[in-house]
């Protein structure tokens, strides 16, 4: 696959940074949009800088084409097992990853890990890394449809509902367009925020999302299908009452349980108190208003149920590590 524009081949690159090689393992039924978005960011980095900052290889286990979940096939660059120098190896998943977790794939991933190659996963590719035992003790992201099952199958893995997670030498994203965010953050780390912002503008992306951004995850996937309907009702009431928060006793009364029972449900299924969950909902709403509107901070605070901008600001710093006004300060290049 041609990864660098031909007009760059003759350029003097004596002062150019080292080219980073990312390899992608396409597993049958992989999500094409997540893979293509990831590669698009790398291509644009090369185009905007007119330097070969990145090269990439699309591979399969045997070098033969495999179908994506959309039924389309990319001609691979070869067999992943023949790759030599690679800086990050990403495994690309899609529907029903458990059906594609072959011994050959597991062994291949373990061999790269033994060579100390950083590993990544797009969409349900995270399942393959977990199945190979390569995410034990790591934080990771996966599509919200697969959150609950991954937690149940691999208890040593710290599953997150974030868009993407970078934990040491593991890079995972939840799928869809989250691969854009993951790659933009990798570009920013390696070559500066200005380049990442320029790429974002080329793709008409309004902002670069970070590891602090969560997937919009339906609650029943977080707590497991068929689990407690009372908890779902309580969270639905919280989401509907952001500007004027309900008291915990009032909330418990509405869903027909005692306050203590409600606290037990939240601890059991969500690992936090109802008050903490409610506060996080309100702060998340506040963050979206800060990033997506021109509302004054005092107005944002009011719309998220805080009695003052000062109280909002204190809670915001505790949650996100920055003051509300800093969300609107352009990042330094």
Image (cartoon, rainbow, N blue to C red):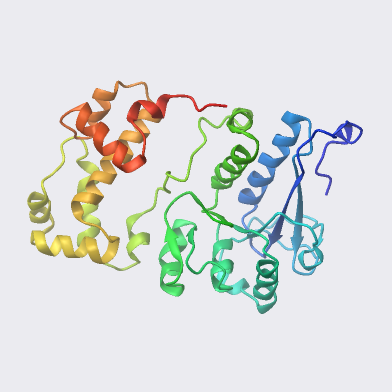
Whether residue 287 sits left or right of residue 149 in the image: it is: left
Observer-nearest residue: 121 or 51?
Answer: 51
- Residue 36, given in percent of the width and then of the height, sits at 67, 47
Q: Quadrant of residue 266?
A: bottom left
Q: Quadrant of residue 84?
A: bottom right
Compare residues 185 and 2 and report the one nearer the observer. Answer: 185
Q: How many marks?
A: 0
Left or right: 316, with 102 as reference point: left
Q: Residue at x 74, y 30 (%)?
A: 49
Q: Quadrant of residue 128?
A: bottom right
Note whether 217 is above or below 17 in the view shown: below
Residue 122 visible: no
Q: Is residue 150 left or right of residue 306?
A: right
Q: Nearer the viewer, residue 269 or 219?
A: 269
Q: Residue furthest bottom?
A: 103
Instruction: Pick out the residue farthest to the front.
Output: 15
Residue at 44 percent of width and 57 percent of height: 144
Q: Nearer the viewer, residue 84 or 107?
A: 84
Image quadrant in which the C terminus is located: top right
Q: Residue at x 31, y 68 (%)?
A: 226
Q: Is residue 252 above or below residue 329?
A: below
Residue found farthest to the right = 10
Q: Position of residue 230 (x, y in %)?
A: 19, 61
* Residue 328 x/y as whole percent: 41, 25
> Whole-percent x and y of residue 115?
70, 67
- Residue 321 visible somewhere in the drawing: yes
């Amino acid at each position: 696959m041609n990864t660098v524009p031909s007009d760059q081949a003759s350029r003097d690159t004596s002062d150019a940074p080292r080219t980073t090689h990312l390899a992608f393992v396409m597993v049958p039924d992989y999500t094409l949009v997540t893979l293509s978005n990831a590669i698009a960011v790398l291509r644009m980095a090369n185009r905007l800088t007119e330097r070969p900052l990145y090269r990439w290889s699309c591979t399969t286990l045997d070098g033969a084409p495999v179908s994506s979940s959309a039924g389309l096939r990319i001609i691979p660059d070869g067999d992943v097992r023949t790759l030599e120098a690679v800086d990050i190896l990403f495994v690309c998943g899609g529907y029903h990853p458990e059906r594609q977790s072959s011994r050959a794939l597991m062994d291949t991933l373990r061999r790269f890990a033994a060579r100390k190659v950083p590993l990544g996963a797009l969409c349900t590719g995270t399942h393959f890394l977990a199945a190979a035992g390569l995410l034990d003790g790591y934080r990771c992201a996966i599509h919200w449809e697969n959150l609950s099952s991954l937690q149940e199958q691999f208890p040593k893995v710290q599953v997150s509902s974030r868009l993407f997670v970078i934990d040491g030498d593991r890079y995972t994203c939840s799928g869809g367009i989250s691969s854009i965010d993951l790659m933009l953050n990798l570009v920013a780390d390696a070559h500066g925020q200005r380049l990442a912002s320029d790429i974002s503008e080329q793709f008409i992306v309004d902002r670069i999302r970070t590891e602090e951004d969560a997937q919009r995850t339906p609650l029943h996937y977080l707590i497991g299908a068929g689990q407690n309907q009372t908890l779902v009702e309580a969270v639905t009431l919280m989401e509907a009452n952001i500007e004027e928060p309900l008291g915990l006793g009032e909330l418990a009364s509405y869903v027909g349980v005692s306050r203590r029972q409600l606290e037990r449900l939240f601890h059991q299924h969500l690992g936090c108190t109802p008050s903490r969950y409610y506060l996080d909902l309100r702060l998340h709403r506040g963050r979206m208003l800060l990033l997506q509107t021109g509302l004054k901070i005092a107005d944002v605070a009011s719309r998220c149920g805080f009695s003052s901008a000062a109280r909002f600001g204190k809670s915001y710093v505790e949650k996100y590590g920055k003051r509300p006004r800093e969300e609107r300060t352009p990042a330094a290049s």
